[in-house]
Structure formats: C-alpha cells, structure tokens
Amino acid sequence: MNLNNLQNIYFLGIGGIGMSALARYFHAKGVFVSGYDKTPTELTQKLIEEGIEVRYNENIELIKKNNPELIIYTPAISASNKELKYFQENNFIIKKRSEILGIICNEKFLIAVAGTHGKTSISSIITHILKCGGKKITAFVGGISKNYNSNFVNDKNSEIVIAEADEFDRSFLTLNPDIAIISSVDADHLDIYGSGEKLEESFVLFSDNIKKDGKLIINKNIQQIFSHKKNKFLYSVNEKEDFFASNIKIENGKFIFDLNLENEIIREIKFKIPGDHNIENAVAASAVAYILGTENHIIKKALESYKGVKRRFDIKINRDDFVFIDDYAHHPEELKSTIKAAKELFPDKKISGIFQPHLYSRTRDFADDFARSLELLDEIILLDIYPAREKPIYGVNSKMLLEKINSGNKILCKRNDLITELKKRKIEVLLTLGAGDIDKLVQTIKDEYEKNI
C-alpha cells in the first residue's frame, strides 16, 4: 500500500517500544497520529509532549469522529479489545506493525538486526556509529538510546534504514535487508514456534530474504545453522574470526579492548557498557560500519562516546557503598550475561537481584534454565510472573520457580512489599531484572536509596 498520501493513522498499542517508534516516524512526516494504550507510561507521556494524541480508554465514539485511514496494531493487543473489534467489523484498513515497517524499510538500503538477544544494543550502536560518520539514517530502535533520548532517529533525506528484525510472530519475514545481522537463535517464543527447531527455521527464512549481493553477519556460535549461506561474515567476542575483540581488560569501570576488523586493528577502545556480551554487540555493530566504509577513527570515537540504552545494564546509582543497575533481561541467557557482567565489574561485592518473570509460557518452558541463571546471584528476590498477553497456566507461578532455585538466600516477594523488604537488607549491588512492569518500580527504588536507605 502507498503510505505517502496518508493523513490520519491510529495505533492500537501505541505505547509499545516498536509501535511508538513507528508513530514517531509518521508524526515526523506530518501525519495526524493518535492511539490507544492500556496504561500511562513515561513513553506515552513523551509521545503526548511531542504532539501525538494518546488515550487509555477504549472509546468507540471518539473513533467515529476521528475516522482514521489506517489502523496499525500490535499482536500484544487483546482480541477482545473493543476498538479492534470495531475496526474489524467496519472494514477499516488494519495492518500489523511488522507489515508497515516492512513497507517503509524495504524502500531504502536496509540494515536489519535479528537475534533472540542483543538486537536493541546492536541497533543502537550501529545508529550511533553511522551518525558519527555523517551518514543520513532513519533508525527504529527497540529501546531508548541514551545518546538520542529516543527509540527513533531520523535525518532528513535519509539514505539508510536501521531496524530491529523481531522474530516474535515471525514479524521479521516482512523485511528484505541489504545487510542482516543475526546475533543468536536461542529457543524462545515457544508459544509461537512450538520448538527451538522451528524458531531456527524461521531465522533461516529471514536470512533467505537478504537482497541479491546483500551481506549476512552472524555470530560465530550459530554459524552451523547458516552453513549453506554465501557472502557471510562471522563475528565473535574473543575468538579469531572476520571481526572480533582481543586484549579485553577492565580499568576504572570501563571495558578496554582491541577491535579486529578483517585485516585492521583499532587499539585500546574504552567502552563504557560492561560485559562481554556488550563487547560482542559492539563488534557486530562495528562490522556493519566497516563494511559500509566507515573510517576506523570514527568507529573508535563512536564506541567510546556510546552511552547505551535505557534498561540495558542501566546504572542508576553508583556509589562506593551501593550500586543499582536496571536491565531488561527476561530470558535465561540474558540473565546469565547480565549477572556475569555485574560480577566482573564488582568482583568483591555481593550481587542481589530482583527478578520478575515475563509470561507464564516462557517461565514454564525454561524454568530449569531460569533457576540455573538466578543461582549466579548471591541473593534472589522473586516477584510474581508478569502475564503480558497471557492467561494463567495451572501450576506455573513464581513459587514453582523459586523451589527450583538451589540457593539458601531466596525469597518470594509481592511488589507492594518490595521496598519494605529492601530496607531490611544490607545490599551492595542491586539488579532489577525483567521485561514486564518491573520498570515502574525502578524510580521508586532509586528514590528510596538516594533519600533513605
């Protein structure tokens, strides 16, 4: 469909990180943008401040007055939503976010970042490197970049689009990239795919969508899945491949490493974002910039000035007596990477974690793996499962998960009791972990520790 002549678009689930970036895209083009979301958040408030209409009640009468030309929705919206039903019953043009993103992205040179982990960090680093190199870009990032205080970066007359290729609901199959990155294919979204093998098949289909003469950049650990692909590059955090890091060390809270780009080396990069997994993300992003001809000194300058993404190892307080870090980790592998990074950065401190499981199905499917990852913490506070789009599954709850964790220092805690529980404890390093509404507790925790604890 032709998106250029639209004047009025309505978003169902406008507060989602991907939906809000798309809303910002159309708003920047002068389209009247409005939308619905279930609850107010910091992000929906920002959209309102930018001139986008957002409301939190399902109101058919307002819809009739507004009469939008296109409805964009996210699969996270319930099928019982009154507005969605109204649109369906009255023959509105209704499209998934992924369909519209595909139309936008495929018109230009597309860099698509796929993988069950690391998409947002890699996308945001690519965005920053190319911006520093003077490239005109449009970027749809799955988190709030601290360098640009947004999940949407847009230059006038942009030549390149950077987008996260989301595997959920096979959304990424709408994209036809010129350059594709695949960072990982760990089993996830089994409620959609049914098995890890089916998930892998979907990633292979995504790689088959790369344009003729396009390039595939893949993590060394998953190369076997894509062994049939030609014109591919491998990257690694510390093993010799086309792109890799070497001489990794920690000094004054920064990770320092040499970046190996095929036959060239950029030495002594001082990277503010902790963890081997984040160095690996930086290597992947740098590979894209290198392939596009970005000069080495620009890559180094960009990596050293990169500030990270909100909720990705996001250090909120860093005192000698107390450190508070917030992270979006919601998969066992992500938990493991984040906890490991905290241990590397603060080797002599006790690491305490508050974890909110995300989805009943994910908790059920990976309960043992979650338990093993959480056992890396010295102290575990487990919140109730955040259901998101799901209804409860019998026998699947946080108590079940707690019982699988082999630790003498673990408790189950209601979110309303969390601050009281924290006040009882002498905490040195605190992690908040999860993709649900645990983010709404972060400011409260920060305020309490800055004022009282």
Image (cartoon, rainbow, N blue to C red):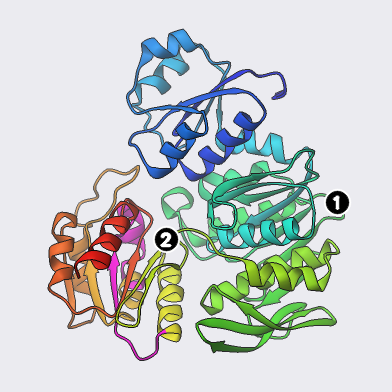
Picture layout, residue 1 above or below residue 395? above
Most extreme residue toward the front, as rendered? Answer: 451
Residue 38: percent from the left, percent from the top? 34, 34
Per the rendered image, the range of residues in magenta is 346-369
Residue drawn at x 48%, y 51% as measured from the top left: 193
Picture layout, residue 263 above or below residue 304? below
Asked if the residues shown at circle 1 and circle 2 are in contact, with their CB atoms under 8 angstroms apart, the answer is: no
Q: Is residue 227 visible?
A: no
Image check: 396 left or right of 157? left
**Label 2: element kind:** loop
Q: Quadrant of residue 376?
A: bottom left
Image check: 431 left or right of 379? right
Between 199 and 269, which is closer to the camera in this rendering?
269
In the image, residue 275 lies in the stretch drawn in magenta: no
Residue drawn at x 33%, y 26% as measured from the top left: 80
Residue 266: percent from the left, percent from the top? 77, 81
Between 407 and 48, which is closer to the camera in this rendering?
48
Looking at the rendered image, the quarter that the N terminus falls into is top right
Label 1 or label 2, whichever comes before in sequence order: 1
Residue 91: assigned label: none
In the image, residue 365 lies in the stretch drawn in magenta: yes
Q: Residues within 10 Å of mark 1 (few under 14, many from 20)?
A: few
User: What residue is disc 2 on?
Assistant: 328
